């Protein structure tokens, strides 16, 4: 996960003349390079928005069973289910992408930390009336 300014910065770096000699079609992981759990990211956003709620853990097998049931109901009703097996499986694991290639070949360094990005996102949501009342 990364804030959009970091992704834009990486694209700008890749467009510079110094990168012309790199092979075309290279793939780069662009993140903050910070090891963070999804739970800690969501908690930071909740805190920044001053939302009164608590994150609760649900056992993966139970949530997966609920998601699979929602998928079956969704197929019958032709509606997108709020939870899917794929989505639940992604929520069950934390991972950090390796940004070494982007650092070495593009000279990439994150412009903003993950916390700074979350703070800016929360400010934008507040300033643009995107929070539930």
Image (cartoon, grey):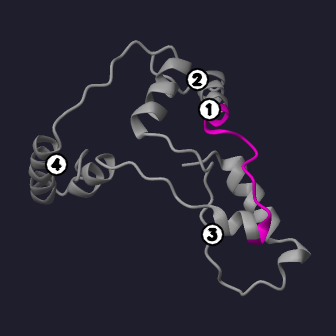
Which is nearer the N-term, disc 1 or disc 3?
3
Q: Residues within 10 Å of mark 4 (few under 14, many from 20)?
A: many
2 or 3: mark nearer the eye: 3
Which is nearer the N-term, disc 4 or disc 1?
4
**Dot 3: element:** loop
Which is nearer the N-term, disc 4 or disc 2?
4
Which is nearer the N-term, disc 4 or disc 3?
3
Q: CA distance from mark 4 to mark 2?
A: 31 Å
Q: Residues within 10 Å of mark 1 (few under 14, many from 20)?
A: some
4 or 3: mark nearer the eye: 3
Residue 115, disc? 1
**Dot 4: element:** helix
- 14 and 97: which one is in front? 97
Give the residue at mark 3.
28
In the picture, measured across the screen, residue 79 lies left or right of residue 13, that is left
Q: Are marks 4 and 3 in contact (CB under 8 Å)?
A: no
Start-end of magenta stretch:
105-118
Give the residue at mark 4.
67
Which is nearer the N-term, disc 2 or disc 3?
3
Q: Is residue 131 magenta?
A: no
Give the residue at mark 2.
129
Looking at the image, residue 133 lies above or below residue 120:
above
In the picture, measured across the screen, residue 107 lies left or right of residue 128, that is right
């Amino acid at each position: 996960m990364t804030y959009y300014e970091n992704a834009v910065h990486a694209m700008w770096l890749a467009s510079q003349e110094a990168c012309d000699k790199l092979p075309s079609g290279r793939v780069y992981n662009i993140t903050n390079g910070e090891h963070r759990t999804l739970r800690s990211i969501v908690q930071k956003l909740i805190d920044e928005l001053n939302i009164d709620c608590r994150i609760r853990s649900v056992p993966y097998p139970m949530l997966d069973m609920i998601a699979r049931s929602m998928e079956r109901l969704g197929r019958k009703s032709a509606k997108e289910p709020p939870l899917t097996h794929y989505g639940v499986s992604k929520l069950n694991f934390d991972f950090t992408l390796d940004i070494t290639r982007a650092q070495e070949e593009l000279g990439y360094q994150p412009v903003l930390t993950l916390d700074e990005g979350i703070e800016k996102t929360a400010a934008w949501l507040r300033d643009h009336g995107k929070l539930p009342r």
